[in-house]
């Protein structure tokens, strides 16, 4: 079974630039999550989708972050404009009927 | 107060040692509990679920104390390959909105 795919794996941008991350969940997984993991901390949930609908985006900084999952399969997370404090690993995870969440390899973002 | 608190460590132990990690959570209505393992620069992966009666998986034993809102992980006969960050994870709320809240992790290094 293929795992959660994410791209790009690494991205370096300057502050105030825009960036987008892509995630393709495990086939058949209805629930998709985006997390932000800052160095030395645990992952923090940004947004949760159930199929193509948003379940929870209460921790998403909506002035600069946006996410979509238009067809209920893959998803994109965008940051516009980026700030220095956005430097982190952005993890995508998906979940099927069971409780376990499966994480992708993440995108490591460096904002300079 | 953080929702999930862990001793960040680091814990440096010799091979063969027994080591225990503790975690407390603030939401008394939390439903499910897990330990995830995260290797350096990798994504988190489920290590084991934590059941009310306590559970064991080989060298790993997890325990839950709902009254004290406390979770523990015991690793016996430590191996070099156990070196990783161990994340305490709480699952809330129930139903389709189920989400994971992560602690900041406890870093373990097993020394030869």
Image: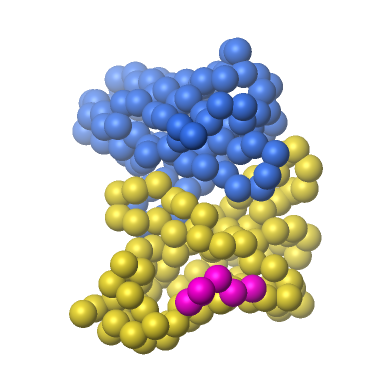
Chain colours: A blue, B yellow
Q: Quadrant of residue A96?
A: top right
Residue at x 57% of width, y 44% of height: A101
Residue B48 placed where, x, y %?
Answer: 56, 62
The residue sitting at 60% across, 13% down in the picture is A71
Question: Looking at the image, is A95 positioned above or below residue A12?
Answer: below
In the rendered image, which quarter contains the C terminus of chain B?
bottom left
Q: Is residue A77 visible?
A: no
Tell me where residue A5 sits by quadrant: top left
Left or right of residue A79, residue A25 in this image:
right
- Front residue (pair A90, B74): B74
Q: For the stretch drawn in magenta, what is the main secondary structure?
A: strand
In depth, the one of B68 and A64 nearer the eye is B68
- Residue B5's x, y, as percent? 54, 67
Q: Is residue B4 visible?
A: yes
Where's the N terminus of chain B, which quadrant? bottom right
Q: How many marks?
A: 0
Q: Residue at x 39, y 83 (%)?
A: B77
Q: Horizontal and vertical percent for residue B101?
A: 59, 52
Instruction: Describe residue B82's horizontal placement relative to residue B34 as left or right.
Output: left
Where does residue A92 sit, x and y in percent of width and height? Answer: 48, 35
> Is B69 left, or right, of B85 in this rendering?
right
Residue at 29% x, 82% y: name it.
B15
Front one among A2 and A59: A2
Start-end of magenta stretch: B55-60
Q: Does the magenta portion include B13?
A: no
């Amino acid at each position: 079974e293929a795992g959660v795919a994410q791209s790009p794996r690494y991205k370096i941008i300057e502050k105030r630039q825009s960036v987008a991350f892509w995630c393709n969940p495990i086939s058949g997984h209805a629930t998709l999550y985006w997390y932000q993991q800052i160095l030395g901390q645990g992952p923090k949930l940004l947004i949760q989708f159930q199929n193509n609908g948003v379940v929870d985006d209460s921790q998403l900084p909506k002035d600069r972050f946006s996410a979509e999952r238009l067809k209920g399969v893959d998803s994109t997370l965008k940051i516009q404009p980026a700030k220095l404090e956005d430097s982190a690993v952005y993890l995508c995870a998906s979940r099927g009927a069971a409780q376990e969440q499966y994480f992708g390899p993440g995108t490591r973002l460096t904002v300079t | 107060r953080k929702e999930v608190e862990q001793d960040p460590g680091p814990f440096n132990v010799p091979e063969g040692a027994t080591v225990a990690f503790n975690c407390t959570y603030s939401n008394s209505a939390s439903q499910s509990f897990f330990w995830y393992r995260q290797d350096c620069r990798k994504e988190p992966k489920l290590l084991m679920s934590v059941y009310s009666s306590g559970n064991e998986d080989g060298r790993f034993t997890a325990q839950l104390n709902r009254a004290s809102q406390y979770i523990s992980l015991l690793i016996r006969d430590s191996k070099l390959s156990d070196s990783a960050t161990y994340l305490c994870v709480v699952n809330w709320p129930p139903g389709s909105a189920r989400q994971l809240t992560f602690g900041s992790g406890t870093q373990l290094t097993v020394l030869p």
